[in-house]
Amino acid sequence: MAQPVEVGDKDFEERVLKSALPVLVDFWAPWCGPCRMVAPIVAELSGEYDGRMSFTKLNVDDNPQVSARYGIRSIPTLIIFKDGQPFRQVVGYQPKLQLKKHLEAALAQG
């Protein structure tokens, strides 16, 4: 089963912005309770959407440059990037069905 890949300030551009597939980035931190709640949902979705979308995680404490660049003030924040640009942003815990709607919207936009 596919799992989200850890990304950081050094490889964000290569793995996210230059990706041929849409990429969901989970901005999180180990001390964040809601982040721990959303992590298994993101992991499940990464398996369901394997081959159609990439899934990554970025620890905001360890990667301040990317976090600042995208104005991450609350976590978890999930941003779907498409063609190197933020397509949709979701802040806070969201149930799986709600997240799937955002993923489907990104895939539907050709």
Image (tube, rainbow, N blue to C red):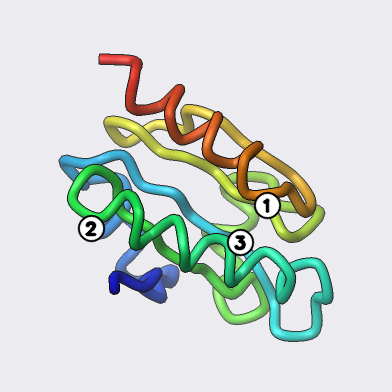
- Quadrant containing the C terminus in the rendered view: top left
Q: Is residue 39 above or below residue 46?
A: below
Q: Which residue in the protein does label 2 denote?
A: 14
- Image position of 58 with respect to 50: above or below: below
Whether label 1 touches label 3, CB < 8 Å: yes
The structure residue drawn at horizontal position 32% and vertical position 49%, both measured from the top left corner, is: 49
Give the residue type that dot 1 points to.
Thr
Q: Earlier in the sequence, mark 2 or mark 3?
A: 2
What is the x, y in percent for residue 91? 75, 45
Pinpoint residue 103: horizontal percent, then vertical percent: 46, 35
Task: Say whether disc 1 or disc 3 marks the residue closer to the N-terminus.
Answer: 3
Mark 2 neighbour density, 10 Å: few (under 14) some (14–19) many (20 or more): few
Residue for badge 3: 27
For the residue labelled by badge 3, is the local secondary structure a helix, a strand or a loop? strand
Looking at the rendering, which quadrant does residue 39 occupy? bottom right
Q: Nearer the viewer, mark 2 or mark 3?
A: 3
Crowding around mark 1 (Cα neighbors within 10 Å: few <14, some 14 to 19, many 20+) is some
Q: Quadrant of the N terminus?
A: bottom left
Q: Is residue 43 left or right of residue 33?
A: left
Examine the rendered structure and indicate whether residue 19 appears above or below residue 74.
Answer: above
Instruction: Please tell me which residue is depicted at 80% across the width and 76% down the height of the picture.
Output: 32
Q: CA distance from mark 2 to mark 3?
A: 17 Å
Q: Are marks 2 and 1 in contact (CB under 8 Å)?
A: no
Q: Nearer the viewer, mark 2 or mark 1?
A: 1
Residue at coordinates 47% horizontally, 68% vertically from top-left? 43
Q: Cα distance, mark 1 to mark 3? A: 5 Å
Q: Earlier in the sequence, mark 2 or mark 1?
A: 2
In the rendered image, which residue does mark 1 sit on? 77
In this picture, residue 71 sits left or right of residue 78: right
Real-space CA distance between mark 2 and mark 1, rounded to the nearest whole angstrom:
20 Å
Q: Position of residue 105 (x, y in %)?
A: 45, 22
Helix, strand, or loop for circle 1?
Answer: strand
